[in-house]
Image (tube, grey):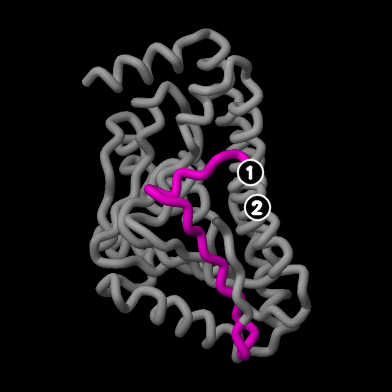
Amino acid sequence: MITSTRHDDGVVEVVVDHPPVNALPVKGWFDLADAITDAGRDEATRAVVLRAEGRGFNAGVDIKEFQRDTTHTALVGANRGCYAAFAAVYDCPVPVVTAVNGFCLGGGIGLAGNSDVLVASDDATFGLPEVDRGALGAATHLARLVPQHTMRAMFFTSATATAAELLAFGSVRRVVPKEELRAAALEIASSIAAKDPTVIRAAKEALNGIDPWDPKRSYRFEQGFTFELNLLGVADRVREDFGKG
């Protein structure tokens, strides 16, 4: 599901491959967090590339895992797993270059929004369909990709934005054909890897330190409302109604 490959220039490539749509179960989120954390902890690592195989980058959490669970264990696990994975990207001591292909939804926005550099294929779309699933979360990260009022409109309506729109907003560095996406991400990561590693690690820590808000804390705040909606039974009803549509 999660593989890591170290390249000669110090770039570590972390790849998610969980068919059919890269909607990760609880274990998958923790495995992803571990892979990124392990890569950053290694002093030989100079940059990380995060990408995915398949139809799209990430479709969020595995809803079917929730449906099989008669308790809230899967929900708590997914909340904690997503938090861990998003935080691993943000806290990684070296820059994380994320390559987005196809759909980037839900948890995918959390990964992309906390990344240092984004490249996208020309068919990539970004969105948070959370309200259609009776959940909240990752608006924190969408707000790092699009302007505030665009984020609010997208969140309330479950609308998506294209890679071209994010390029215009300045949150995506490059948009390329899908077949060129991996190469584009590795090229940017290699250019970072060629810099002095001590300076780059200091720069990553410095940039995190001047962020206007803490994305880990704000995401945790959002998660509380998701849990409330599940405790109230609203999430199950909304998911059932959405499935009938």
Q: Is the magenta stretch mostly helix, strand or loop?
A: loop
Q: Residue furthest top?
A: 232
Q: Is residue 51 left or right of residue 41?
A: left
Assign the C terminus to one quadrant of the image: top left
**Residue type for callout 2:** Asp
Element at label 2: helix
Q: In this view, does 36 lie above or below 8?
A: above
Q: Residue at the location (50% across, 34% down)?
A: 137
Q: Can you tell which mark lies on residue 27?
A: 1
Disc 1 from disc 2: Cα separation: 6 Å
Q: Looking at this view, is 101 or 114 the one in front?
A: 101
Residue 16 position, x and y percent, is 51, 59
Q: Looking at this view, is 14 or 148 the one in front?
A: 14
Q: Looking at this view, is 213 or 185 the one in front?
A: 185
* Residue where numbered disc 2 is placed: 31
Query: Is disc 1 surrounded by few (<14), some (14 to 19) or many (20+) residues within 10 Å?
Result: few
Residue 47 position, x and y percent, is 61, 76
Residue span colored magenta: 7-27
Q: Do the residues labelled 1 and 2 touch (CB within 8 Å)?
A: yes
**Residue type for callout 1:** Lys
Residue 198 position, x and y percent, is 75, 83
Q: In this view, does 174 lie above or below 101?
A: below
Query: Is disc 2 surrounded by few (<14), some (14 to 19) or many (20+) residues within 10 Å?
Result: many
Q: In this view, does 55 lie to the left or right of 82?
A: left
Q: Confirm whether the magenta stretch covers residue 11.
A: yes
Q: Which quarter of the figure has residue 26?
A: top right
Residue 68 shows in this picture: yes
Q: Residue at the location (61% across, 28% down)?
A: 74
Residue 204 position, x and y percent, is 66, 70
Q: Residue at the location (33% across, 29% down)?
A: 156
Q: In this view, does 94 lie above or below 104?
A: below
